[in-house]
Amino acid sequence: MKRLKPLWDRLLFQDKGVLPTKTFIIYFSLFIIALFFLSFWRFSWLFLMFATILFLCLSIIDLYLMPGRKELTITRELTKEMERYENYLVKMTIENKSSFDCIIRIKDSFPVSFQTTFPENQSIPKLQKTMLSYEIKPLIRGKYTIDKLYTRYRSKIGLWERQLTFNQKDELKVIPNLSETKKYLASAQNYLLHEGIKIRKMKSGMGEFSKVRSYVVGDDPRKMNWRQSAKLQEMMTNEYEPEHGKNLTILIDCGRMMGVELEEGNRLEKSIEAAITLATAALDNGDHVSVIAFSKDIKTVIPSGKGLDHLNTILQGIYSLQVDPQESNYELAIRYIQSVQNKRSMIILFSDIQTFIHEDHHLFYLKELRRKHLFLMLGIKDLLLHQKIEKKPTTVKLAMEKSVAQKQYLLQKKGMRKWEKHGLPMLESPAEDLAVTAVSQYIDTLNRGLL
């Protein structure tokens, strides 16, 4: 079996060596058929063997009409950091130092978590450098090492194909998709919505002074700047914004229930993307942000920092988080926050609400946490549950499913109200709106002066 392994690797577009092409197999098959019919005319076996050997020798000439192993070099250029579900170009520089043209096929050593379209049958001129490119699309976050580059090339006659493997080690990171973060930076006002209602303005005189602007209908007369109005002979008003320098702690649950698959990705993927967008909003506002990821144990801790430069620190710390098959230890996470977060802060937990509300012993620890900090839990709506609730009960089976789904939904709402009575609000949002809901709640908290 060990002796057959190099041959097997060669057939799988790996290793190095020479292989016959489809063209060779077709020509050789036609040649054998011709010899078969000629054999009925009593040609000698010696003639048949001589003709076969002559055909093979003539075909070997094709090997000398293609570049040698040392006459072809390939280098790869790729982006070292890629966003999940985004398309990227990988560029290839192929240098042909020989006096013969060739036709090349390339396969890179990307894992199956990348969607790829490799170059096929590309013509490489002699004594020239040629640029090729192809698209890749990463599907799973993490750190990857790409170290092999497999090629097959042939001459224009195309009877034989030479296979080479080039060693070039490149490391790349697949980070969460930042489309929501970019949308926020492009237009923050689109994220100041929750349940279709704009966040109300701050109370008069609250927050930090921002600027003086022209008075418009609807402004509070108590915020009029009479000195500037007199100077400019125009009605001017003061504008305030939430105070900067607040503390935000983001908790990301990586336990078993966060692995539930959605239409695109799973709950953890959407929670990480929403957490990054929320961190961007807070850092852009001048606040301090820290991130803690946990499951059975504490997985990642990113200390508090401010400024948009800190966003890269957060991104590098959580880009490779994966779902663990264990249940989450909320008690450990809560105790850890109490030990490291001394200043009053807003704590936002991304987790599965249905699992959390059935664990009553968490209430004691969260009530202790609530004395010093603000707490908010965000989860993703169970679309399957809501689809069953909205279905018309046209059959007995559908009626039973609808009844069970409604009962489960009512029990969940009852549990959420119980926690909210203790000052521990919980919100569920569709996966695509999770980032909007998180940013909206954060800004609303600042505007109301709760933090």
Image (tube, helix red, strand yellow):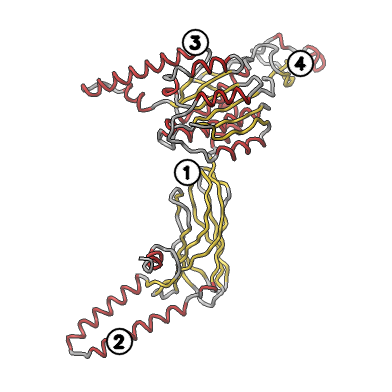
Q: Label 3's element?
A: helix
How far is disc 3 from disc 2 in space, using C-alphas?
A: 94 Å
Q: Nearer the viewer, mark 4 or mark 3?
A: 3
How far is disc 2 from disc 4 in space, using C-alphas?
A: 104 Å
Mark 2 and mark 4 lie on one chain; the one further toward the N terminus is 2
Judging by the rendered image, the residue that carries numbered circle 1 is 140
Residue at the extreme top of the image, as rendered: 222
Q: Is residue 293 above or below residue 391?
A: below
Judging by the rendered image, the residue that carries numbered circle 3 is 421
Residue in the image at 50% along x and 60% along y: 148
Q: Residues within 10 Å of mark 1 (few under 14, many from 20)?
A: some
Judging by the rendered image, the residue that carries numbered circle 4 is 234
How far is disc 1 from disc 4 in space, using C-alphas?
A: 57 Å
Q: Label 4's element?
A: loop
Q: Residues within 10 Å of mark 3 (few under 14, many from 20)?
A: few
| Three-letter residue code for mark 3 | Lys
Q: Nearer the viewer, mark 1 or mark 3?
A: 3
| Three-letter residue code for mark 1 | Ile
Quadrant occupied by the C terminus: top right
| Three-letter residue code for mark 2 | Ala
Mark 1 and mark 3 lie on one chain; the one further toward the N terminus is 1
Q: Please say if the residues under marks 1 and 2 sit with CB atoms less than 8 Å apart.
A: no
